[in-house]
Image (cartoon, rainbow, N blue to C red):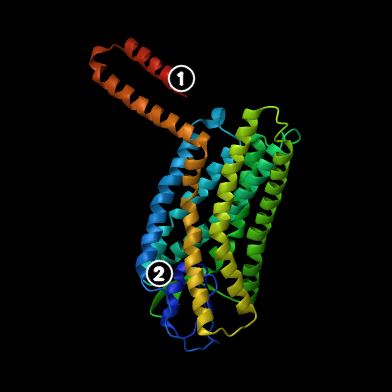
């Protein structure tokens, strides 16, 4: 049976066979019988697990830090775009939790040996990867549209940029991502593959066609919308820069624009190579092309490297927030000082607890809250 491995981390399996044609990680076509020598990346079972663990730790800590900082002020001190930032960080945080599984699989040459829970973990982790990919690009598209409304249609978009409308938009994005990820959940399962078990997907022509259309709907179209939004924004800013009534407001607007644009550029740079290799390999399968050994090796290694680059994106965004977003850094400092102040107040309270009465303690607590509010 032909098998479709959705994640390029499963690409290790090909070197056990003399025929292979890779789509999104590993499409084995028994009709292709080229006797190709092994050409996999040497040491990939060592450097890939290390890279996955690095992405896991940095992505987990970084996105958790972003969620904590952005949510620390609540509705009172937050920006509307922060709602998208929190949801984007949440999607990346959930995704990186699956990377230890793929790191273990990578260290075992792509085999999926997780016992009785292997099939569940295979389906769930693949589903989470798909949902993360879709939710990321959808949230970035929403952030671009939000920047467009804030700069170009500010007076006409009060309702669209309201807190309630943005929350509804985020709910729609999550629902759409969950729906688009269903094929990875349905078609993926653990089967015997070569010398062990692998997390693979059944493949047929209809599924290949759907896999080919999906990047157009969930990558090309959103990127086109993003480019259209930012092209209009840049034209607007260049036209009205000299006539800006409030320079400080204009500076804040440009700063927020630069931060969002940096996140989008990082996402496109990370996921574009992966989508290119995916479209090329699926197209070659649909056209029944018999590829040379060099072409097969190029597709395998290209998918492997581009997948690592795509995964790396989940740990890049927190660095962008920290280094480019002054508003984020300021709130991080406030949160740090608040936590440090609470720690000092708690130590002071514990050291003087035996010398205070209930009235004094309550008064002290009130003073502490006042200090914290002043620090915010």
Please give left or right for residue 15 compared with residue 285 in the image: left
Residue 323 or residue 191, whichever sits in front: 323
Camera-near label (1 vs 2) is 1
Question: Disc 1 designates what residue?
Answer: 374
User: Would you place residue 221 above or below residue 192 in this image?
Assistant: above
Q: Residue furthest right?
A: 156
Q: Which residue is pictured at 49% across the width and 78% down the height?
A: 297
The residue singled out by tag 2 in the image is: 112
Q: Is residue 94 visible?
A: no
Of callouts 1 and 2, the N-terminal one: 2
Image spot of residue 168 (x, y percent): 65, 42
At which x and y percent is residue 133? 56, 57
Up the image or down, 259 lies above or below 331; here it is below
Q: Which mark is residue 123?
A: none
Residue 251 in the image: state x and y as whole percent.
61, 33
**Quick check: 3 above or below 117?**
below
Q: Residue 218: x percent and y percent? A: 64, 59
> What secondary structure is marked by label 2?
loop
Find the distance from the CA under tag 1 to the CA under tag 2. Answer: 54 Å
Q: Is residue 153 left or right of residue 97?
A: right
């Amino acid at each position: 049976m032909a098998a479709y491995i959705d994640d390029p981390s499963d690409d290790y399996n090909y070197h056990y066979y003399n025929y292979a044609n890779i789509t999104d990680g590993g499409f084995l076509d028994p009709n292709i019988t080229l006797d190709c020598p092994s050409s996999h990346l040497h040491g990939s079972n060592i450097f890939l697990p290390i890279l996955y663990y690095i992405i896991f730790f940095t992505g987990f800590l970084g996105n958790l830090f972003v969620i904590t900082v952005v949510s620390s002020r609540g509705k009172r001190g937050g920006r509307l775009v922060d709602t998208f930032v929190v949801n984007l960080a949440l999607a990346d945080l959930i995704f990186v939790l699956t990377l230890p599984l793929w790191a273990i699989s990578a260290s075992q040459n792509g085999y999926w040996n997780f016992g009785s829970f292997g099939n569940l973990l295979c389906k769930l982790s693949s589903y989470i990867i798909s949902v993360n990919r879709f939710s990321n690009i959808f949230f970035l598209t929403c952030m671009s549209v939000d920047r467009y409304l804030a700069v170009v249609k500010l007076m006409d978009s009060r309702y669209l940029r309201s807190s309630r409308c943005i929350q509804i938009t985020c709910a729609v994005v999550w629902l759409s991502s969950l729906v688009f990820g269903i094929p990875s959940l349905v078609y993926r399962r653990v089967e015997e593959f070569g010398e062990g078990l692998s997390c693979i997907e059944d493949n047929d022509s209809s599924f290949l066609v759907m896999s080919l259309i999906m990047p157009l709907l969930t990558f090309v179209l959103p990127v086109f919308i993003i480019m259209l939004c930012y092209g209009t924004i840049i034209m607007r800013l260049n036209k009205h820069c000299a006539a800006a009534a409030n320079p400080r407001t204009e500076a804040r607007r440009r700063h927020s624009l630069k931060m969002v644009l940096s996140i989008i550029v990082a996402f496109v740079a990370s996921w574009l190579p992966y989508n290119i290799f995916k479209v090329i390999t699926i197209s070659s399968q649909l056209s029944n092309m018999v590829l040379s050994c060099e072409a097969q090796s190029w597709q395998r290694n290209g998918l492997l490297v581009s997948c690592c680059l795509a995964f790396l994106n989940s740990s890049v965004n927190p660095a962008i927030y920290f280094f480019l977003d002054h508003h984020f850094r300021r709130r991080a400092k406030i949160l740090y000082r608040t936590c440090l102040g609470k720690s000092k107040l708690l130590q002071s309270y514990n050291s003087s607890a035996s010398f205070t009465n209930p009235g004094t303690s309550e008064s002290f607590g009130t003073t502490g809250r006042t200090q914290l509010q002043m620090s915010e």
